[in-house]
Each structure stands twice: as structure tokens, then as C-alpha cells.
Image (cartoon, rainbow, N blue to C red):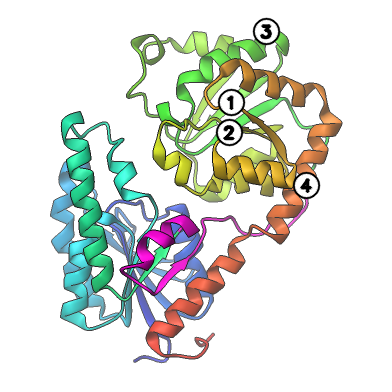
């Protein structure tokens, strides 16, 4: 083994600068002293923040992904890493093969509840979703048993793997601890939603919510930061002209690089989490956007989903409302805009919790400990 243990991070789905894959895990492990290579679709060849980048073909969209898999295996073998860490369920059989070919530790990073996620894939014909989900879940359990460890994003997810893979570690998707205190008072009346927005994440109630807010608080704006998926919505929503969205103060800002996201959050007054409980993955998943809002000092309006509602109430950092009720969401938003001192107090409580209880640094330490354990090492070299 080289002086610095070599970790190869593999993904056939995520972009090279994905928040969890690159900015949290790969970059943190490089800073901890590991030599890290990242193989990802469309990655620019070279090095970024201590991480060596290796490109995969990025053409073909979803249909082109199977052509990436053998290329990824070939690149992984050429890297001759001491440990391999892959991120996509579609790579599970390839991860098992990689383990058998290299005899090196292989780690599977599970981001989503696979069965529930597949049951809501709009591109899979509806009659096939449940059978495909059952088969995928069985493959996931089989592969997890063959691999050396599983990284899960929630305790509930880890419990699913515990029976087949005792070396399962929870590494939550949390932002880094805030480095400076934000301004809590005097923010512009902007409601921000960061990350993917679709029918399961509030897109269906966005216009109705914004319309109520605009009538009561005309200066308010909704900033939708990230990709938008329109499938599953009625034609009236899909075909609504931009002028109508602008009339109620909704602005679609598109996707920005992850390092720029905090600057948008700092220019908002409220963080919005309108998740739909009908999507089971929403009920189970860890609400990482919630903690990003907290780290920015934003008071939060959140759907009444178990995990995010528990955190909001426990910390006292926002208002929980019935999940897909636009009137309730709008009333909570207007209340915070009309009571800035109370909103600032909520934002401060959320910020304090993000800094002391919900930060990436503690999660990175757990991942580092897993790596050193699998490699039979002490602390890695700086």
C-alpha cells in the first residue's frame, strides 16, 4: 500500500461536483489525508481541491448509462485503489464483481430508499414499478451481503441493511458547520426553495401558495433554486406562461454550483420545504435541505412529514403545516414575513442547532473511521 491510502470514488449517475459525492465525502477524505480519485460522468480531467478526477462518457442520458458501466469498471481496475466507494444502486452487481476481481474493500453508499424510490419513477410503466422495485430491493440486499460495508444516510435506512451487512455506518447528508453568523434581521421578503422541485416536492402547490402570499404581502418573492421537473402535474400547471408565474412573484433561478448556494440562502427570509407525504421516500428520507436552511439562519415553513417536522418543532426553528395545503403554507409564510422579530429568533435557533448538532464534520469523521478500519490502518497521513 502506498504511503497515502488510495480511495476510488465511483458514480455512473451523479455529476462530478455532486454535493454529497464530491463536496462532502471525496473532498473531506482528501483533506483527511487519503489519496482520492473520483470517476464520474463528464468530469474534467485533472485535480480539484485535492481530488483527482477521471471522466466517464456523459452522453446518452438514462439510456446511455449501461454503456458507462464497463468503462467505469475498467477505469476502477486501472486505478488500483486500496478501497473503492460507489454511489449508485445500478452499480451494485459491478461493485460485487470489482470486489471479487481486486480483493480490495468495496463500500456501497445508499442515498435513497431504493424500493420506495423506484415505485415513484415516472419513466417506468406503472404496472412494472412494484415488480421492478421488489427485484431491485432483493439485488440490493444480495449485493450488500457480498460487499465490505454500507454507508446509509439515515438510521432507518441503516436498520434495513443491518441484517445482511453488519458493517453499516450512518453518514448523514449535512452541510459543513457555518463559518460565520448570518444576518437575522432586515432580510428581503424572499421565500427560497433550494434543490430539485417536482410534484413530490411542492411544485403542484407553488402557484396557489404564491398567489395567496402575493395578495396579502405583494412585495414577497419565491426563488426556486435548482432543477424543476414538470412530470405528473396537470396541463394547466405545465403550460402556465412565465408571465403568470411572475405575476405572483415566482422566479425560477435554475441550478447554480454548490459553493454559490449559501449566498442565495443568505439573501432570503424564509426556507420552504413543501414535501408530499404520498411519496414514501419523502417520509423516510433525511431532510438535508432543512439543515442547509438552518445553517443559513432561515426560519422554515415545512410540510408535516415525520423527520423534518420533529426537527423543526424540537429546535423551534420554524412552522410546520399540513403537507399539501397551499393556504396553510401561505398563511405560515405571511406570518413570518409579518413578524420579523419572531422569524429572526427562529432563524437564530436553527443556526445554533446547525452549528452544534447538525454539521458535516462529525459525519466526515465517521466515514474516515470506516475507511481506516477497512484498510487496517491508524489515522491516515496528512
Instruction: Check if mark 1's residue and mark 4's residue have beta carbons within 8 Å.
Output: no
Q: Nearer the viewer, mark 3 or mark 1?
A: 1
Disc with the residue nearer the chain's start (4 vs 3): 3
Disc with the residue nearer the chain's start (1 vs 4): 1
Secondary structure state at the residue bearing disc 2: loop
Report the front residue among 70 and 136: 136
Q: Which residue is mark 3?
A: 215
Disc with the residue nearer the chain's start (2 vs 1): 2
Secondary structure state at the residue bearing disc 4: helix
Return the x and y of residue 24 as percentages of the image width and height: 50, 61
Horizontal relation, residue 265 to residue 374: left or right: right
Disc with the residue nearer the chain's start (3 vs 1): 3
The region drawn magenta spans 153-182
Return the x and y of residue 15 as percentages of the image width and height: 36, 51
Q: Residues within 10 Å of mark 4 (few under 14, many from 20)?
A: many
Distance between the alpha carbons at the discs numbered 2 and 3: 25 Å
Secondary structure state at the residue bearing disc 1: loop
Instruction: Check if mark 4's residue and mark 3's residue have beta carbons within 8 Å.
Output: no
Q: Nearer the viewer, mark 1 or mark 4?
A: 1
Q: Is residue 184 visible?
A: no
Q: Is residue 114 visible?
A: yes
Horizontal relation, residue 43 to residue 136: left or right: right
Up the image or down, 30 lies above or below 373; here it is above
Secondary structure state at the residue bearing disc 3: helix
| Numbered mark located on residue 304 in the image | 2
Q: Nearer the viewer, mark 4 or mark 2?
A: 2
Horizontal relation, residue 106 to residue 27: left or right: left
Q: Residues within 10 Å of mark 2 (few under 14, many from 20)?
A: many
Q: Which residue is mark 1?
A: 322
Q: Which residue is mark 4?
A: 349
Amino acid at each position: 500500500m502506498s504511503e497515502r491510502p488510495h480511495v476510488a470514488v465511483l458514480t455512473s449517475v451523479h455529476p462530478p461536483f455532486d454535493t454529497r459525492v464530491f463536496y462532502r465525502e471525496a473532498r473531506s477524505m482528501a483533506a483527511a489525508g487519503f489519496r482520492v480519485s473520483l470517476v464520474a460522468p463528464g468530469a474534467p480531467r485533472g485535480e480539484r481541491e485535492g481530488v483527482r478526477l477521471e471522466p466517464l462518457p456523459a452522453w446518452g442520458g438514462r439510456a446511455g448509462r449501461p454503456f458507462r458501466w464497463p468503462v467505469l469498471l475498467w477505469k476502477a481496475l486501472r486505478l488500483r485503489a486500496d478501497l473503492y466507494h460507489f454511489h449508485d444502486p445500478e452499480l451494485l452487481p459491478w461493485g460485487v464483481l470489482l470486489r471479487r476481481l481486486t480483493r480490495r474493500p468495496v463500500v456501497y453508499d445508499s442515498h435513497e430508499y431504493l424500493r420506495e424510490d423506484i415505485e415513484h419513477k415516472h419513466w417506468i410503466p406503472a404496472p412494472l414499478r412494484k415488480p421492478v422495485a421488489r427485484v431491485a430491493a432483493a439485488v440490493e440486499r444480495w449485493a450488500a451481503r457480498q460487499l465490505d460495508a454500507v454507508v446509509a444516510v439515515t438510521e432507518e435506512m441503516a436498520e434495513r441493511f443491518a441484517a445482511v451487512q453488519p458493517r453499516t455506518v450512518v453518514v448523514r447528508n449535512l452541510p459543513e458547520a457555518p463559518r460565520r453568523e448570518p444576518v437575522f434581521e432586515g432580510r428581503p421578503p424572499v421565500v427560497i426553495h433550494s434543490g430539485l422541485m417536482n410534484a413530490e416536492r411542492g411544485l403542484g402547490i407553488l402557484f396557489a401558495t404564491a398567489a395567496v402570499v402575493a395578495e396579502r404581502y405583494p412585495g414577497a418573492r419565491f426563488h426556486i433554486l435548482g432543477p424543476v421537473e414538470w412530470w405528473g402535474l396537470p396541463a394547466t400547471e405545465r403550460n402556465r406562461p412565465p408571465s403568470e408565474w411572475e405575476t405572483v412573484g415566482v422566479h425560477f433561478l435554475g441550478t447554480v454550483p454548490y459553493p454559490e448556494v449559501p449566498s442565495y440562502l443568505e439573501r432570503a427570509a424564509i426556507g420552504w420545504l413543501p414535501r408530499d407525504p404520498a411519496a414514501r421516500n419523502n417520509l423516510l428520507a433525511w431532510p438535508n435541505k432543512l439543515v442547509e436552511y438552518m445553517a443559513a439562519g432561515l426560519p422554515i415553513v415545512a410540510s408535516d412529514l415525520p423527520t423534518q417536522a420533529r426537527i423543526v418543532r424540537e429546535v423551534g426553528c420554524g412552522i410546520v403545516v399540513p403537507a399539501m395545503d397551499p393556504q396553510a403554507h401561505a398563511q405560515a409564510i405571511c406570518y413570518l414575513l409579518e413578524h420579523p422579530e419572531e422569524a429572526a429568533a427562529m432563524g437564530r435557533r436553527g443556526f445554533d442547532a446547525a452549528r452544534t448538532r447538525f454539521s458535516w464534520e462529525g459525519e466526515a469523521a465517521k466515514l474516515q473511521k470506516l475507511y481506516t478500519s477497512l484498510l487496517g490502518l491508524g489515522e491516515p497521513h496528512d
